[in-house]
Image: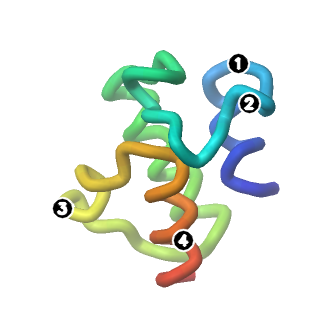
């Protein structure tokens, strides 16, 4: 499952809304609990560990995809 699909399913939105430039919180309606849950899903899906410091920088769909590409 790709990043866009994971985000869309978790937030209950259309995958077409999930584009690289979108902010999870400001554009897609996620709250802090959603972001924590999504980080856990990304860690599980891509077999990586995302530190709290790194997680704070992952605010857009594009930044999440870039991080996963670099570390998965």
State the image coordinates of residue 8 (x, y, percent, origin top left). Answer: 70, 31
State the image coordinates of residue 59 (x, y, percent, origin top left). Answer: 36, 44
Q: Mark 2 to mark 3: distance in Å?
A: 25 Å
Please tell me the numbered disc located at residue 12: 1
Q: Give 43 or 3, whichever is nearer the viewer.
A: 3
Of labels 2 and 3, earlier in sequence is 2
Of labels 4 and 2, earlier in sequence is 2
Is the C-beta separation of discs 4 and 2 under 8 Å? no
Mark 3 lies on a secondary structure that is helix
Q: Kindly identify the residue that appears in the image at 62 percent across and 23 percent down.
A: 11
Please tell me the numbered disc located at residue 53: 3
For the image, the number of numbered tags is: 4
Q: Mark 4 to mark 3: distance in Å?
A: 15 Å
Please tell me the numbered disc located at residue 9: 2
Q: Rate crowding at label 2 as few (under 14), some (14 to 19) or many (20 or more) other CA atoms within 10 Å.
A: few
Asked if residue 24 is positioned above or below residue 54 in the image, the reply reads: above
Mark 4 lies on a secondary structure that is helix
Mark 2 lies on a secondary structure that is helix
Q: Which of label 4 and label 2 is nearer to you?
A: 4
Is the C-beta separation of discs 4 and 3 under 8 Å? no
Of labels 1 and 3, earlier in sequence is 1
Give the quadrant of the C terminus: bottom right
Mark 1 lies on a secondary structure that is loop
State the image coordinates of residue 25 (x, y, percent, origin top left). Answer: 39, 25
Q: Give 46 or 66, whichever is nearer the viewer.
A: 66
Task: Kindly identify which residue carries mark 4.
Answer: 68
Q: Mark 4 to mark 1: distance in Å?
A: 22 Å
Q: Mark 4 to mark 2: distance in Å?
A: 18 Å
Quadrant in which residue 60 is drawn: top left
Q: Give 14 or 22, whichever is nearer the viewer.
A: 22
């Amino acid at each position: 499952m790709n990043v866009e699909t994971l985000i869309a399913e978790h937030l209950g939105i259309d995958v077409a809304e999930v584009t690289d430039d979108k902010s999870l919180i400001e554009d897609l309606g996620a709250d802090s609990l959603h972001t924590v849950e999504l980080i856990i899903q990304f860690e599980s899906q891509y077999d990586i560990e995302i530190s709290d410091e790194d997680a704070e920088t992952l605010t857009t769909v594009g930044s999440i995809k870039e991080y996963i590409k670099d570390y998965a």
